[in-house]
Image (tube, rainbow, N blue to C red):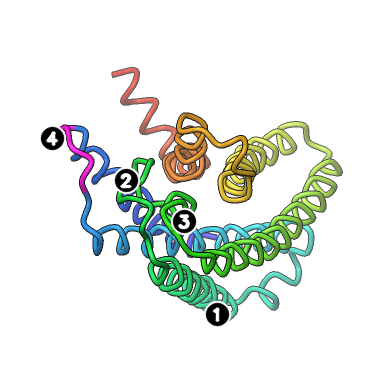
Protein backbone atom coordinates (compact mmCIF):
# COMPACT_ATOMS: atom_id res chain seq x y z
CA UNK A 1 0.00 0.00 0.00
CA UNK A 2 2.82 2.43 0.80
CA UNK A 3 4.36 1.75 -2.60
CA UNK A 4 1.13 2.91 -4.23
CA UNK A 5 0.89 5.88 -1.86
CA UNK A 6 4.39 6.98 -2.86
CA UNK A 7 3.40 6.99 -6.52
CA UNK A 8 0.10 8.72 -5.74
CA UNK A 9 1.92 11.45 -3.81
CA UNK A 10 4.24 12.09 -6.76
CA UNK A 11 1.26 12.27 -9.11
CA UNK A 12 -0.65 14.64 -6.82
CA UNK A 13 2.39 16.89 -6.54
CA UNK A 14 2.92 16.88 -10.30
CA UNK A 15 -0.76 17.43 -11.09
CA UNK A 16 -1.25 20.44 -8.86
CA UNK A 17 2.15 21.89 -9.88
CA UNK A 18 1.11 21.81 -13.53
CA UNK A 19 -1.77 24.27 -13.24
CA UNK A 20 -1.64 26.34 -10.05
CA UNK A 21 1.84 27.97 -10.21
CA UNK A 22 1.17 29.49 -13.64
CA UNK A 23 -2.31 30.62 -12.57
CA UNK A 24 -0.91 32.19 -9.39
CA UNK A 25 1.87 33.93 -11.33
CA UNK A 26 -0.63 35.33 -13.81
CA UNK A 27 -2.79 36.54 -10.93
CA UNK A 28 0.15 38.26 -9.21
CA UNK A 29 1.36 39.94 -12.41
CA UNK A 30 -2.20 40.74 -13.56
CA UNK A 31 -1.81 38.93 -16.87
CA UNK A 32 -3.32 35.90 -18.59
CA UNK A 33 -0.55 35.16 -21.08
CA UNK A 34 0.87 31.73 -21.86
CA UNK A 35 2.91 30.74 -24.89
CA UNK A 36 1.65 28.25 -27.46
CA UNK A 37 4.40 25.78 -26.51
CA UNK A 38 3.75 26.40 -22.81
CA UNK A 39 0.06 25.63 -23.32
CA UNK A 40 0.89 22.37 -25.09
CA UNK A 41 3.34 21.35 -22.33
CA UNK A 42 0.82 22.19 -19.63
CA UNK A 43 -1.89 20.14 -21.33
CA UNK A 44 0.49 17.21 -21.83
CA UNK A 45 1.55 17.03 -18.18
CA UNK A 46 -1.97 17.61 -16.83
CA UNK A 47 -3.45 14.75 -18.88
CA UNK A 48 -0.44 12.58 -18.03
CA UNK A 49 -0.70 13.04 -14.25
CA UNK A 50 -4.52 12.90 -14.16
CA UNK A 51 -4.71 9.69 -16.21
CA UNK A 52 -1.93 7.94 -14.31
CA UNK A 53 -3.49 8.94 -10.97
CA UNK A 54 -6.86 7.52 -11.96
CA UNK A 55 -5.33 4.15 -12.84
CA UNK A 56 -3.31 4.16 -9.63
CA UNK A 57 -6.52 4.73 -7.68
CA UNK A 58 -7.99 1.75 -9.52
CA UNK A 59 -4.99 -0.37 -8.58
CA UNK A 60 -5.21 0.81 -4.97
CA UNK A 61 -8.87 -0.22 -4.74
CA UNK A 62 -7.87 -3.70 -5.94
CA UNK A 63 -5.06 -3.74 -3.39
CA UNK A 64 -7.51 -2.93 -0.58
CA UNK A 65 -9.99 -5.51 -1.89
CA UNK A 66 -7.41 -8.30 -1.81
CA UNK A 67 -6.04 -7.20 1.58
CA UNK A 68 -9.46 -7.16 3.26
CA UNK A 69 -11.46 -9.78 1.35
CA UNK A 70 -8.73 -12.29 0.47
CA UNK A 71 -5.95 -11.67 3.02
CA UNK A 72 -4.50 -15.20 2.80
CA UNK A 73 -3.91 -14.76 -0.95
CA UNK A 74 -2.43 -11.26 -0.68
CA UNK A 75 1.20 -12.34 -1.00
CA UNK A 76 0.37 -14.42 -4.07
CA UNK A 77 -1.87 -11.95 -5.91
CA UNK A 78 -0.01 -8.76 -5.03
CA UNK A 79 3.65 -9.48 -4.65
CA UNK A 80 6.33 -6.89 -5.34
CA UNK A 81 6.55 -7.86 -9.02
CA UNK A 82 2.78 -7.51 -9.53
CA UNK A 83 2.81 -4.08 -7.86
CA UNK A 84 5.66 -2.89 -10.08
CA UNK A 85 3.86 -4.14 -13.18
CA UNK A 86 0.65 -2.34 -12.17
CA UNK A 87 2.57 0.87 -11.48
CA UNK A 88 4.39 0.65 -14.81
CA UNK A 89 1.07 0.09 -16.59
CA UNK A 90 -0.44 3.17 -14.90
CA UNK A 91 2.53 5.42 -15.76
CA UNK A 92 2.69 4.04 -19.30
CA UNK A 93 -1.03 4.49 -19.90
CA UNK A 94 -0.84 8.07 -18.66
CA UNK A 95 2.06 8.78 -21.01
CA UNK A 96 0.27 7.22 -23.98
CA UNK A 97 -2.96 9.11 -23.32
CA UNK A 98 -1.20 12.44 -22.86
CA UNK A 99 0.76 12.03 -26.09
CA UNK A 100 -2.40 11.07 -27.98
CA UNK A 101 -4.54 13.93 -26.64
CA UNK A 102 -1.84 16.59 -26.92
CA UNK A 103 -0.82 15.66 -30.46
CA UNK A 104 -4.42 15.40 -31.62
CA UNK A 105 -5.56 18.64 -29.95
CA UNK A 106 -2.69 20.80 -31.17
CA UNK A 107 -2.82 19.38 -34.70
CA UNK A 108 -6.16 21.18 -35.15
CA UNK A 109 -6.26 24.54 -36.94
CA UNK A 110 -7.02 27.13 -34.27
CA UNK A 111 -8.56 30.20 -35.87
CA UNK A 112 -11.27 31.07 -33.34
CA UNK A 113 -9.04 33.49 -31.45
CA UNK A 114 -6.26 32.95 -28.94
CA UNK A 115 -8.17 33.30 -25.65
CA UNK A 116 -8.53 30.15 -23.54
CA UNK A 117 -11.39 30.94 -21.19
CA UNK A 118 -9.93 28.99 -18.26
CA UNK A 119 -7.12 29.32 -15.70
CA UNK A 120 -5.15 26.56 -17.46
CA UNK A 121 -5.00 24.97 -20.91
CA UNK A 122 -7.92 22.55 -20.93
CA UNK A 123 -8.93 20.39 -23.90
CA UNK A 124 -12.61 21.53 -24.14
CA UNK A 125 -11.57 25.19 -24.09
CA UNK A 126 -8.96 24.66 -26.81
CA UNK A 127 -11.46 22.76 -28.97
CA UNK A 128 -13.71 25.83 -28.87
CA UNK A 129 -10.99 27.71 -30.78
CA UNK A 130 -10.92 25.17 -33.61
CA UNK A 131 -12.47 26.19 -36.92
CA UNK A 132 -12.40 22.72 -38.49
CA UNK A 133 -14.63 19.68 -38.27
CA UNK A 134 -11.52 17.63 -37.54
CA UNK A 135 -12.03 18.48 -33.85
CA UNK A 136 -14.50 15.57 -33.87
CA UNK A 137 -11.47 13.23 -33.80
CA UNK A 138 -10.59 14.53 -30.35
CA UNK A 139 -14.23 14.31 -29.26
CA UNK A 140 -14.29 10.63 -30.26
CA UNK A 141 -11.08 10.01 -28.30
CA UNK A 142 -12.57 11.76 -25.26
CA UNK A 143 -15.73 9.64 -25.45
CA UNK A 144 -13.72 6.41 -25.74
CA UNK A 145 -11.54 7.51 -22.82
CA UNK A 146 -14.68 8.23 -20.79
CA UNK A 147 -16.03 4.74 -21.51
CA UNK A 148 -12.78 3.18 -20.32
CA UNK A 149 -12.79 5.42 -17.24
CA UNK A 150 -16.38 4.37 -16.50
CA UNK A 151 -15.24 0.75 -16.60
CA UNK A 152 -12.49 1.48 -14.08
CA UNK A 153 -14.92 3.41 -11.89
CA UNK A 154 -17.38 0.49 -11.81
CA UNK A 155 -14.48 -1.82 -10.92
CA UNK A 156 -13.57 0.51 -8.05
CA UNK A 157 -17.20 0.63 -6.97
CA UNK A 158 -17.46 -3.17 -7.06
CA UNK A 159 -14.26 -3.46 -5.00
CA UNK A 160 -15.60 -1.11 -2.35
CA UNK A 161 -18.94 -2.90 -2.20
CA UNK A 162 -17.08 -6.13 -1.45
CA UNK A 163 -14.89 -4.31 1.08
CA UNK A 164 -17.92 -2.85 2.87
CA UNK A 165 -19.60 -6.27 2.98
CA UNK A 166 -16.48 -7.68 4.61
CA UNK A 167 -16.21 -4.75 7.01
CA UNK A 168 -19.81 -5.11 8.15
CA UNK A 169 -18.97 -8.64 9.28
CA UNK A 170 -16.29 -7.32 11.66
CA UNK A 171 -17.59 -7.93 15.21
CA UNK A 172 -15.82 -4.91 16.71
CA UNK A 173 -17.59 -1.57 16.30
CA UNK A 174 -14.23 0.22 16.57
CA UNK A 175 -12.86 -1.90 13.73
CA UNK A 176 -15.83 -1.11 11.51
CA UNK A 177 -15.53 2.61 12.28
CA UNK A 178 -11.81 2.59 11.45
CA UNK A 179 -12.40 0.86 8.12
CA UNK A 180 -15.25 3.18 7.10
CA UNK A 181 -13.35 6.29 8.18
CA UNK A 182 -10.51 5.44 5.79
CA UNK A 183 -12.55 4.13 2.84
CA UNK A 184 -15.39 6.64 2.65
CA UNK A 185 -13.29 9.87 2.32
CA UNK A 186 -11.20 8.29 -0.43
CA UNK A 187 -14.33 7.12 -2.24
CA UNK A 188 -15.91 10.59 -1.87
CA UNK A 189 -12.87 12.36 -3.37
CA UNK A 190 -12.66 9.81 -6.16
CA UNK A 191 -16.36 10.27 -6.98
CA UNK A 192 -15.90 14.05 -7.00
CA UNK A 193 -12.94 13.75 -9.38
CA UNK A 194 -14.75 11.42 -11.78
CA UNK A 195 -18.15 13.13 -11.79
CA UNK A 196 -16.83 16.67 -12.26
CA UNK A 197 -14.25 15.73 -14.91
CA UNK A 198 -16.81 13.72 -16.88
CA UNK A 199 -19.31 16.56 -16.69
CA UNK A 200 -16.67 19.11 -17.72
CA UNK A 201 -15.62 17.11 -20.78
CA UNK A 202 -18.95 15.60 -21.86
CA UNK A 203 -21.52 18.27 -20.99
CA UNK A 204 -23.52 19.74 -23.92
CA UNK A 205 -22.42 23.21 -25.10
CA UNK A 206 -25.89 24.60 -24.42
CA UNK A 207 -25.34 24.56 -20.62
CA UNK A 208 -21.75 25.79 -20.73
CA UNK A 209 -20.84 29.03 -18.97
CA UNK A 210 -17.50 30.53 -17.85
CA UNK A 211 -18.40 30.31 -14.16
CA UNK A 212 -19.59 26.69 -14.40
CA UNK A 213 -16.49 25.69 -16.37
CA UNK A 214 -14.26 27.34 -13.78
CA UNK A 215 -15.97 25.63 -10.84
CA UNK A 216 -15.83 22.20 -12.49
CA UNK A 217 -12.16 22.62 -13.40
CA UNK A 218 -11.23 23.56 -9.84
CA UNK A 219 -13.21 20.61 -8.46
CA UNK A 220 -11.44 17.99 -10.57
CA UNK A 221 -7.98 19.54 -11.04
CA UNK A 222 -7.25 21.20 -7.68
CA UNK A 223 -9.40 19.65 -4.93
CA UNK A 224 -8.47 15.92 -5.28
CA UNK A 225 -4.66 16.43 -5.37
CA UNK A 226 -4.95 18.79 -2.40
CA UNK A 227 -7.21 16.53 -0.31
CA UNK A 228 -5.64 13.12 -1.08
CA UNK A 229 -2.49 13.72 1.04
CA UNK A 230 -4.68 14.83 3.95
CA UNK A 231 -6.88 11.72 3.72
CA UNK A 232 -4.00 9.24 3.56
CA UNK A 233 -1.74 10.98 6.08
CA UNK A 234 -4.54 11.02 8.66
CA UNK A 235 -4.52 7.22 8.53
CA UNK A 236 -1.07 7.22 10.14
CA UNK A 237 -1.20 7.31 13.94
CA UNK A 238 2.26 8.89 14.23
CA UNK A 239 1.21 11.78 12.00
CA UNK A 240 -1.97 12.22 14.05
CA UNK A 241 0.07 12.35 17.28
CA UNK A 242 2.53 14.84 15.81
CA UNK A 243 -0.32 17.06 14.58
CA UNK A 244 -2.05 16.86 17.97
CA UNK A 245 1.17 17.96 19.74
CA UNK A 246 1.61 20.80 17.27
CA UNK A 247 -1.95 22.07 17.81
CA UNK A 248 -1.85 21.77 21.60
CA UNK A 249 1.61 23.35 21.82
Mark toward the viewer: 4 or 1: 4
Question: Pointer 1: residues within 10 angstroms few (<14), some, or many (20+)?
Answer: few
Q: CA distance from mark 1 to mark 2?
A: 41 Å
Residue designated by label 1: 85
Which residue corresponds to the image point at 34% horizontal and 25% vertical from the top-left? Answer: 245
Instruction: Tell me which corner region of the image, top left, top right, bottom left or bottom right, holds residue 226.
Output: top left
Position of residue 49 in the picture relative to residue 120 (left or right): right
Instruction: Tell me the element at label 4.
Output: loop
- Disc 3 and disc 2 in contact, CB within 8 angstroms: no
Q: Which residues are magenta?
A: 28-33
32 drawn magenta: yes
For the C terminus, give its image quadrant.
Answer: top left
Residue 237 appears in the rendering: no
Residue designated by label 3: 127
Asked if 79 appears above or below 28 in the picture, the reply is below
Which residue corresponds to the image point at 64% horizontal and 73% vertical from the top-left? Answer: 78
Instruction: Tell me the element at label 3.
Output: helix
Amino acid sequence: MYFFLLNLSLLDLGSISTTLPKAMANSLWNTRDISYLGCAVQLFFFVFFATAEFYFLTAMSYDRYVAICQPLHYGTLLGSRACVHMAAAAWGTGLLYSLLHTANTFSLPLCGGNVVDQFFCEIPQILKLSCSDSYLREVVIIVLSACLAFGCFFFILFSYVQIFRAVLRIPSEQGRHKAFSTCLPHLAVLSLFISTSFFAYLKPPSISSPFLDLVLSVLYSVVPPAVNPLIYSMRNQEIKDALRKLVTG
